[in-house]
Amino acid sequence: MKEYMQFIPQEVARLKEEGLFTNIKTLESPQGAWVEINGEKKLNFCSNNYLGLAANPEIRKAAKDAIDKYGVGPGAVRTIAGTMTVHKELEEKLARFKKVEATMVVQSGFSANLSVIPALVGKGDIIYSDSLNHASIIDGSRLSRAEIKVYEHNNMESLRAVLEADKDLNCHKLIVTDGVFSMDGDIALLDKIVELAEEYGVMTMVDDAHGEGVLGHGGRGIVDHFGVHGRCDVEVGTFSKALGVMGGVIAGSQGLIDYLNQKARPFLFSSALTVPDTAAVSKAVDLLMESEELVTRLWDNGKYFKEEMQKLGFNCGNSDTPITPVMIGDAKVATEFSKRLFDEGIFATKIGFPTVPKGKARIRVMISAAHSKADLDFALEKFTKVGKEMGLI
Ligand SMILES: *Cc1c(COP(=O)(O)O)cnc(C)c1O
């Protein structure tokens, strides 16, 4: 590599030395309870495919039918010529599903956060951000150039303290939080956050990426879970997790969505979500509106697995959702545990620093409605075997 680009291999070498280099695995099969990696079947505990919709036959068909009718690419950004019937249908359907006045569909959840935050706050304004918020919230916040004040994770005393300190400042203020925190599986205290926001006259925004299709009545999300409809100003969601496809949504009042249609830069300057993605998401929402069976199965699976793991003597942290962290502590031990599980046919990643604090390394098990009871029992047997071999239980 050219001399002035030597920093690149140097940084890669450093990542490898410190055990922070990610070896990216390739899946040779569709997403599902089991996946194929290097020609071997592995039980999949890594995907965010909570409801098993990523390879659902009805959704595949909806995407193919839409391609036959409308083609593939949107051809333009939404504001010029990229808004098609499929987009409008999906936005109206999502507004009914989420019981809001209006929604706006964008290319991804990441893009949704970059769309909303800089449109609501700017230089001279203030963002109150949970210390464990997702990278896309952090990047959206930085892009806005507002001042970012971080409050302690899900701690309402800490949030109140920063709001109180700024109460006489006259600027736009926004509280922003993840709905479900993906590394621990705990849920933001959105009812309390909304109360504080109302008391101090501050905007609220929740990024419900891991709650969309998971929390609330039939998977309607965190706002529905807490019954705070109309009180949380902005709800961001993704279609890449429980809905099994790709894309992002912003839900709120008609006034908010009209404003974002004019102001959100990824909506104005990056082309629309593709036709098959949009039609596939639309079908996924239909399936959620028809039946709660998948959401119920997801929660039943999560409850069963977590309870059995705790009986075996594993520490599963403070999760309130089907996300099941298996707390290990030492990063090297967690890496070894994950490797041995993989050899036994279980694909479950290690999560370590900097994603979680030092000394809090864990294996994160992502439970899905796609898992059968036999799958979960197979995993419990392997966790027991490897756990005992390593002296962890
Ligand atoms: C996964 C995730 C995103 C990104 O969503 P994509 O649709 O995959 O871009 C954004 N926010 C949170 C909280 C997430 O967990």
Image (cartoon, rainbow, N blue to C red):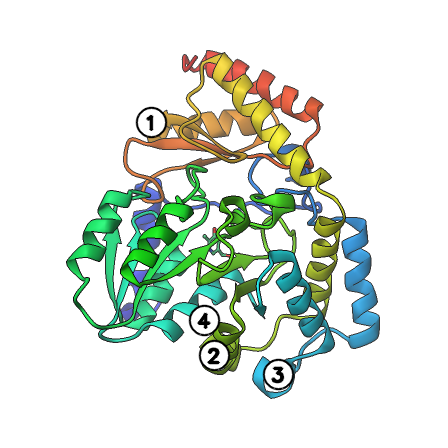
**What SS does tag 1 mark?**
strand
Mark seen at residue 259: 2
Left or right relative to 303: residue 314: left
Between the residue at mark 1 and the residue at mark 3, the CA separation in whole angstroms equals 48 Å
Quadrant for the N terminus in the image = bottom left
Q: CA distance from mark 3 to mark 2?
A: 20 Å
Residue type at tag 4: Ser
Q: Is residue 330 above or below residue 271?
A: above
The residue lying at 65 percent from left, 57 percent from top is 97
State the SS at label 2: helix
Q: What is the CA distance from the residue labelled 4 to the residue labelled 3?
A: 17 Å
Image quadrant in which the C terminus is located = top left
Q: Closer to the N terminus: mark 2 or mark 4?
A: 4
Q: Residue 319 at what x, y percent from top left?
A: 45, 32
Q: Percent from the top left, x then y, of residue 185? A: 45, 38
Q: Is residue 49 visible?
A: no
Give the CA separation, mark 2 to mark 1. 46 Å
- The residue mark sitting in front, 3 or 2, is 2
Lower sequence index among marks 1 and 3: 3
Q: Earlier in the sequence, mark 3 or mark 2?
A: 3
Residue identifier under label 4: 115
| Residue 50 coordinates in the image, percent (x, y) | 61, 42
Could you tell me the amino acid type at mark 1? Gly
Report the residue at 55% width, 17% height from top: 308
- Residue under numbered circle 1: 329
Q: Nearer the viewer, mark 4 or mark 3?
A: 4
Circle 4 crowding by C-alpha within 10 Å: few under 14, some 14–19, many from 20: many
